[in-house]
Amino acid sequence: MDIIYAIWLRNVKRYVRSKSRILGSLGMPLFFLLILGFGLNSVVVIPGTGEGYLEFLIPGVIAMTVLFTSISAGVQIIWDKQFGFLKETLVAPVSRLEIMLGQTLGGATTAFIQGLIILVFSVLIGLIIVSAVGFLIAFLFMILIGIAFTAFGIAIASRMEDMHGFQLIMNFVIFPIFGLSGALFPIESLPSWLIPVTLLDPLTYGVEGLRYGLSGTAQVDPVVCFAVLGGFTIAMAAIGSYLFRKITI
C-alpha cells in the first residue's frame, strides 16, 4: 500500500503544482458550457424532459472533462520511460501491479478534481442539484469514468514509446468515444442505425449516470449504467495491469 500511496501522491502533487495544466484543461469544457450551452439554450428544448440545452449539456461536459484528463495520464507513463523514472521504479522490490494501481488512482484523482471544478462552475451558472444523494451519485460516476479511462490510457501507453504518437492515437480514439456518448445530443434523437453504436460506447453509461445524479432524468436506467460502467472499469484495470506488467525498459 505504501508504494500505491507514494505514486498516487506524486501524481497529485505534480497536478496541483502545474497551474498551467489545470487552467489549460478547463478551456474546452468552458467553451462548450459558455458558447454552445448558452448559445443553444434559448432555442433547444430536450424532447420528453422539457429541460433546456444547457442543463442537458452539463453532465456531458463534466464527463468529457474527466475523460480527457484521465486518458492523458498515459502520457505520464511515456514521460517516465523517457526520463528513466519508470526504470528506477520497476527495478525496485515492489510489484508492478502496485505501481500501475498507484498511477491509475493518481490519474483518476486528478481527473475527478478537474470534473469537480466544472461541476462547481456549473452550479454557479445555474445548475440545480436535485438532491444530496444525486450529488453523491454524480461523484460515483465521475470516479468510475476516471479509473476506467486512466487504466485505458495506461494500457495504450504501456505498448508505446513515442509521446506524440500516443497523443495522436488518443485523439483518434477519445473523440469518437465522446461524440457517440450522448453527451451533446439525446440518444433518442439519433438515427436508428446509430443508437446501437452509441450503446456500445462505455462513456454513454457514464454520461447517463451523471445526468441521472444531477437532474434526476436519464435515457438509460441508472442501475444498468452502473453495472456496465463498473464492469468496464474492472476490465480496463485488469487489461491495464496485464499490459503494464509486460513493459520492457
Image (cartoon, grey):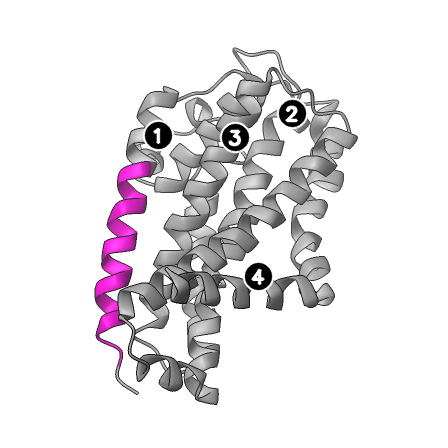
Residue marked by disc 1: 226
Question: The magenta stretch spans which residues?
Answer: 230-247
Q: Secondary structure at mark 2?
A: helix
**Mark number for residue 138?**
3
Residue marked by disc 4: 12
**Mark number for residue 86?**
none
Question: Within 10 angstroms of label 1, few (less than 14), some, or many (20 or more) residues?
Answer: some
Give the label, 1 or 2, closer to the camera.
Answer: 1
Question: Within 10 angstroms of label 4, few (less than 14), some, or many (20 or more) residues?
Answer: some
Q: CA distance from mark 2 to mark 3?
A: 14 Å
Residue at position x 46%, y 67% in the image:
7
- Quarter of the view holding residue 199: top left
First in sequence: mark 2 vs mark 3:
2
Residue at position x 39%, y 29% in the image:
191
- Quarter of the view holding residue 165: bottom left
Query: Is 33 covered by the magenta stretch?
Result: no
Residue 182 seen from this side: no
Q: Is residue 31 above or below residue 122?
A: below
Give the label, 4 or 2, closer to the camera.
Answer: 4
Residue marked by disc 2: 55
